[in-house]
Amino acid sequence: MLGGFKEFILRGNVLDLAVAVVIGAAFNGVVNAVVASVFNPLIGAVFNASSLAKSFPLTIPTTSGGHAVIEFGAVIAALIQFLVVAVVVYFVFVMPMNIFKRRADMRKAAGQPADKDTPPTELAVLEQIRDLLAKGSDPQPAGRHEA
């Protein structure tokens, strides 16, 4: 049981996921500050409130004689925050990776290597081995035959 846990922890993608969570948490702080300090006051000013979170209040009576306030502005502020995060993630991470992948695919289709420093993929190596075996060639370098 401990061996399986050790194998899980030592996988590369667990470390990548941990880094992503830490960066995401830090990025969340930046987005919260921008939404709370810039967007909320601007939109709140349009609706004559101190901030967007305090906009669109709906007061409803309670059974105990008091009242409860539903603040629809807070939901709108959360939606704006989500959209800001989505836009930044798309334009900073997704779009550049898509462009990079498209250029690499175009180079590969043209018969050029994707990058001189990039080693061939496992699939490319297996295809080379398959082709050599199909030709009946010896995949070992010259002078290195097993006896």
Image (cartoon, rainbow, N blue to C red):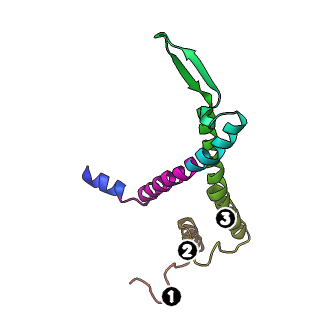
80 left or right of 61?
right
Given contact means CB atoms under 8 Å apart, are the residues at marks 2 and 1 in contact? no
Q: Residues within 10 Å of mark 2 (few under 14, many from 20)?
A: few
The residue lying furthest to the left in this view is 2
> Residue shown at 55%/74% (left/top)?
119
Q: Give the x, y percent position of residue 45.
A: 69, 38
Q: Give the x, y percent position of residue 8.
A: 36, 54
1 vs 3, front mark: 3
Q: Main secondary structure of the magenta part?
A: helix
Indicate the amino acid at tag 3: Phe
Q: Mark 3 vs mark 2: which is more N-terminal?
A: 3
> Residue shown at 35%/56% (left/top)?
9
Which residue is disc 1 drawn over?
142
Indicate the amino acid at tag 1: Ala
109 left or right of 130?
right
In the displayed structure, would residue 69 be above or below residue 73?
A: above
Residue 91 occupies quadrant: bottom right
3 vs 2, front mark: 3
Magenta stretch encompasses residue 29: yes
Which residue is disc 3 drawn over?
100
Q: Which residues are magenta?
A: 10-32
Q: CA distance from mark 3 to mark 2?
A: 17 Å
Q: CA distance from mark 1 to mark 3?
A: 39 Å
Indicate the amino acid at tag 2: Pro
> What secondary structure is found at the residue carrying circle 3?
helix
Magenta stretch encompasses residue 121: no
Q: Residues within 10 Å of mark 3 (few under 14, many from 20)?
A: few
> What secondary structure is found at the residue carrying circle 2?
loop
Which residue is disc 2 drawn over?
119
Residue 96 occupies quadrant: bottom right
Given contact means CB atoms under 8 Å apart, are the residues at marks 1 and 3 in contact? no
